[in-house]
Image (cartoon, rainbow, N blue to C red):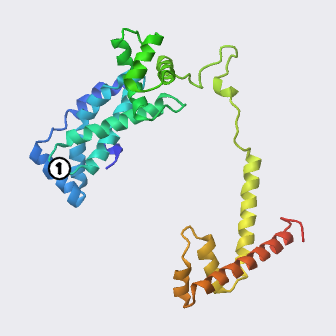
Amino acid sequence: MSVNTLPIVSSEGGIGRYLQEIRKFPLLARDEEYMLATQLRDKDDVDAAHKLVTSHLRLVAKIAFGFRGYGLPMSDLISEGNVGLMKAVKKFDPEKGFRLSTYAMWWIKASVTEYILQSWSLVKLGTVAAQKKLFFSLRKMKKQLGVVDDNALTDQHTKQLSTDLGLSEREITNMDRRLSSRDMSLNAPLPSEEGMEYIDLLADDRPNPEVIAAKAQDKSWKSGVLEEAMATLPDRERHILSERRLSDDPQKLEELGQHYGISRERVRQLEVRAFDKVKKAVLELSAEKGLIPAM
């Protein structure tokens, strides 16, 4: 099933309405959940999948609200959680004996936390388990140490967290700085230049249209030359060369040998001979067309 078949969280202002909508979906008894999960597994029943997902949308919202302190739209957190829920429903095995909510909780949290890590900054955050733990728990740890979120950690606090988490003091200091100040938007206005944004100062490294057109034309010419050169080969050599050198999934010498009733060594010889012929023909045709100097 698709995310588009679920109730949509349109914006922050629409959270209340969304919560009202998802409360309309009934919770499932254990027996009903088992029956639906079995139908999905055995018959790929889309209706069963829809009921399993919609009955757990409230769980997604509850988990997503637990991550609302990271400055991201609640609608996005819920949407990502719904993606995790659908993955859980697809992989859920009712024969294991536990409820879908127990299994789905981990998929939902994984989807939401991964989204937060990807969205927090354009610069990649650490991905090791200890660093992820630090990212999501540093605010709580600072509060326990009596440090207000906006204030930096003292050297003593940093050393204590380094020991507790098994991370270097530098990693903890860097993470604290990242959490204390979000990245500036590239669309923020420049204070010194009216009507300009920070993005206007970035160099555009993309090739200009003339370069793109020239490359496309050059590719077209080379493809045409190769096609003409291949046409000069006998059918068998052309087929062998195509399957061995031009295919995304090259055939083995043994397979082509069986196809033509010859040895693998003979196939290899034909391949080399065909390649040499094509190489020579490409050089001659390229010279004729002015793509390279005549030899």
How many other residues sit within 10 Å of disc 1, few (<14), some (14-19) or many (≥20)?
few
- The residue located at (34%, 33%) in the rendering is 78
State the residue position of label 1: 96
Could you tell me residue 270's position as x and y percent? 66, 84
Task: Report the side of 61 relative to 268 (left or right).
Answer: left
Query: In the displayed structure, would residue 203 be above or below residue 232?
Result: above
Q: Secondary structure at mark 1?
A: helix
Task: Report the side of 168 relative to 189 (left or right).
Answer: left
- The residue located at (76%, 54%) in the rendering is 214
Quadrant showing the C terminus:
bottom right
The answer to whether residue 116 shows anywhere in this view is yes
Quarter location, residue 134: top left
Query: In the displayed structure, would residue 81 be above or below residue 180?
Result: below
Could you tell me residue 207's position as x and y percent? 72, 44
- The residue located at (75%, 71%) in the rendering is 225
Quarter location, residue 135: top left
Which kind of residue does numbered mark 1 sit on? Lys
Quarter location, residue 100: top left
Task: Report the side of 208 relative to 292 (left or right).
Answer: left
Front residue of this view, candidates 99 and 203: 99
